[in-house]
Every structure is written in structure tokens, then in C-alpha cells.
Amino acid sequence: MNGPALILVDVQNDFCPGGTLAVPDGDRVVAPLNRAAAAFAAAGLPVLASRDWHPPHTAHFQAYGGLWPVHCVQGSAGADFHPDLQLPAGTLLLSKGIDERLDGYSAFDGITAAGATLAEVLAAQGVDHLVIGGLATDYCVRATALDARERGLAVTVLIDAVAGVDLQPGDSDRALAAMHRAGTRLCTTDEVVAELARRGTAT
Ligand SMILES: [Zn+2]
């Protein structure tokens, strides 16, 4: 049976206020994502969580030619998920940014502890629709949504459960526009939770 899955992208301390690469108001995504994750879990649908999981030396960091300050180094407190994030039992973890030569923005670049890719996990679970929230709108959320569309999945981005870096003003808005042009649906967490409730009563 085909159906949707939820992926929480990089809701980690370093991307939240107080972190080394804090997204403005990054922690505002936590409450809606907790609601979404609980609704997916209650409906028996898959929940996945990606995390940026960098080695200390990577071409992704400014000191080694990259764009970014040091963040989400493997095993550091900054790489931990936000303490208020409630991952349902059975949430599948994907680690990305492990390759020191690559940025690893997309969750499709991530692997599970068992070494499976996101594409393999989704195929095995019959997922044809990826619902996405998390950080940051203009990098990892954008890359994940566009990759999912290229792979033929339906994609929904939870507009109240994403936040962007906006290195250049307007980057997040441009990212949302690019995702929309690629066929991504943009809607609120409450809309998706209500759809799941209707789906539950219909079966
Ligand atoms: Zn990173």
C-alpha cells in the first residue's frame, strides 16, 4: 500500500537559537513538527528524521573552503536534536554530511545506521508522498524537496514548520517558490493533520 511519510529535517541544536549556525527563530518548527509526528505515528505512517552529521574537517566548513561556520560535528551537543523535539518510537534516523568532500544538504544524501539510503527506505515502505518540515528552508529542506520531486514523489512542505537561514534577504521565499514550481505543495501542519484524521476515518 502506498502512502505518505513525514521527514523532520535537521532539527538540531546548532540550527536553533544559541547554536553555531542558528536559523532565526529556528526553534519555532519544534511545536508543529511534534504535532505532525504524533499524527503520523498515530496513523501508523512512517516518521523519519535527518541530521547533519559532519566530521570535524570538511570542505563544508569555512576553514576548509566552505560556506559555513563549524556546526553539527558528529557527537557534539550542537549535533543533538532540539531537546523539545519528540520523536515517536520507531523514528528512522538518517545521517548526512558525513562525506568530508560534500555539503550533504539533501536528506537523500543521508544513510541509516544500517547503511540504507532514504530512497531505499521509502521504496521499502511503499512511500509515494514525502511530507517535509525542519531546517533550513533555503538549504536542506529545499534540497530534500527538489530531490524528492526528481524521484517522482509527491511532496508537501509544512510552511509553518520550516525556517530559513536567509544569508541573502529573500532566500527562503525564493526557495519556497522554487519548490512550488517543481510541484511541491505548500500547506500548514494543521491542514496535513486534518487530512490524516480524515484518512483514518475513511479506512
Ligand atoms: Zn551542514
Image (spheres, rainbow, N blue to C red):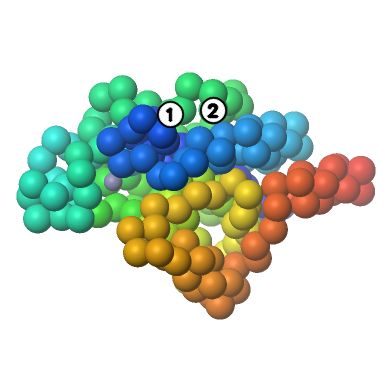
Mark 1 lies within 8 Å of ligand 1 (Cβ measured): no
Visible residue check, residue 158: yes
Front residue (pair 180, 37): 180
Q: Residue at x 8, y 47 (%)?
A: 63
The quarter holding residue 183 reads: bottom right
Q: Percent x, y for residue 55?
A: 17, 37
Front residue (pair 50, 13): 13
The quarter holding residue 152 reads: bottom right
Q: Percent x, y for residue 136?
A: 43, 50
Q: Amino acid at mark 1?
A: Phe
Compared with 182, 37 (above or below) is above
Check whether the beta carbons of the residues at disc 1 and disc 2 lie within 8 A of each other: yes
Is label 2 in a helix, a strand or a loop? loop
Classify residue 63 as left or right of residue 83: left
Classify residue 170 as left or right of residue 20: right
State the separation of the CA atoms marked 1 and 2: 7 Å
Q: Residues within 10 Å of mark 1 (few under 14, many from 20)?
A: many
Visible residue check, residue 151: no
Q: Which mark is residue 81?
A: 1
The quarter holding residue 129 reads: bottom right
Q: Percent x, y for residue 75?
A: 26, 24
Q: Quickly name the residue at label 2.
A: 85
Q: Amino acid at mark 2?
A: Leu
Classify residue 115 as left or right of residue 65: right
Farthest residue, direction left: 64
